[in-house]
Image (cartoon, rainbow, N blue to C red):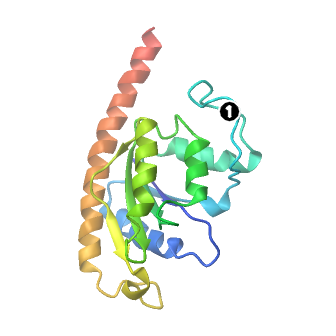
């Protein structure tokens, strides 16, 4: 089972890689997933979209600089998105990554790890969760949240009090693994049915 940890913002000086590193270490120690990191800052993500809806053309011609992202999303069985909230919503890069893809999210499990000021990133995952639901992805109930993250992590990027966040990450991984396993079985059934038509 492949889990992709997606760093959802690309702003200069962002804290996302630090949070993603923390979560990736926990997910790797968990042992149920092969863990990959997808950093949206490494990929071309124009906000201008193809003229045809992805429902009609789920695999449009994409910019060359997006091909690696498309391949990584396709290979994943599940995702955990690490994102702050911007202006009570989520980053434009994450929106573009979602909107440029269709089948890559379909029938896959998705969890969220948020960080921000007072909200702890909660406002940064409600909207993408709704959009991903429309793409037939399953967003799990539990999440990990870091309100005032700049007080919770020390200068080296380690949590000052790691026990509670680690427990929350374990619960998130439990849910993502359960739904990812169920979704993988369902995708195999759909493939077999399509092959017999």
Give the quadrant of residue 180.
top left
Residue 140 location, x and y as percent? 31, 50
Within-10-Å neighbours for mark 1: few <14, some 14–19, many 20+: some
Q: Give me the residue at 41% from left, 49% from top.
A: 129
Is residue 52 depicted above or below 122 in this figure?
Answer: above
Residue 2 seen: no
Which of 181 and 55 lies nearest the eye of the viewer?
55
Q: Residue furthest top?
A: 197
Residue at x-position 68% and y-position 41%: 49
Quadrant of the drawing holding the C terminus: top left
Q: Is residue 110 visible?
A: yes
Q: In this view, does 157 lie above or below 145?
A: below
Q: In this view, does 65 lie to the left or right of 73?
A: right
Q: Residue at x 35, y 23 (%)?
A: 189
Taking the view exactly as shown, the residue that stands out farthest to the bottom is: 155
Q: Position of residue 98 (x, y in %)?
A: 55, 46
Residue at image coords 61%, 44%: 70
The answer to which quarter of the image holds residue 145 is: bottom left
Residue 25 in the image: state x and y as whole percent: 40, 70
Q: Mark 1 points at which residue?
A: 60
Q: Which residue lies furthest to the front in this view?
A: 87
Could you say whether the residue bearing mark 1 is in a helix, strand or loop?
loop
Q: Where is residue 66 in the image (x, y as percent from the top left)?
A: 69, 48
Q: Nearer the viewer, residue 188 or 172?
A: 172
């Amino acid at each position: 089972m492949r889990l992709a940890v997606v760093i959802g913002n690309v702003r200069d000086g962002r804290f996302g890689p630090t949070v993603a590193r923390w979560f990736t270490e926990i997910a790797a120690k968990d042992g149920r997933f092969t863990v990959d990191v997808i950093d949206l800052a490494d990929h071309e993500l124009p906000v201008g979209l193809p003229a045809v809806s992805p429902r009609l053309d789920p695999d449009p011609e994409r910019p060359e600089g997006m091909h690696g992202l498309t391949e990584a999303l396709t290979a994943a069985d599940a995702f955990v998105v690490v994102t702050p909230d911007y202006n009570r919503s989520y980053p434009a890069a994450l929106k573009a990554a979602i909107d440029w893809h269709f089948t890559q999210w379909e029938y896959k499990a998705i969890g969220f790890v948020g960080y921000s000021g007072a909200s702890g990133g909660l406002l940064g995952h409600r909207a993408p969760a709704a959009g991903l639901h429309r793409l037939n992805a399953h967003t799990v109930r539990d999440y990990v949240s870091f309100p005032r993250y700049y007080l919770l992590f020390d200068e080296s990027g380690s949590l000052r009090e790691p026990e509670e966040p680690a427990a929350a990450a374990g619960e998130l991984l439990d849910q993502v693994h359960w739904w990812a396993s169920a979704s993988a079985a369902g995708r195999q059934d759909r493939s077999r049915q399509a092959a017999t038509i």
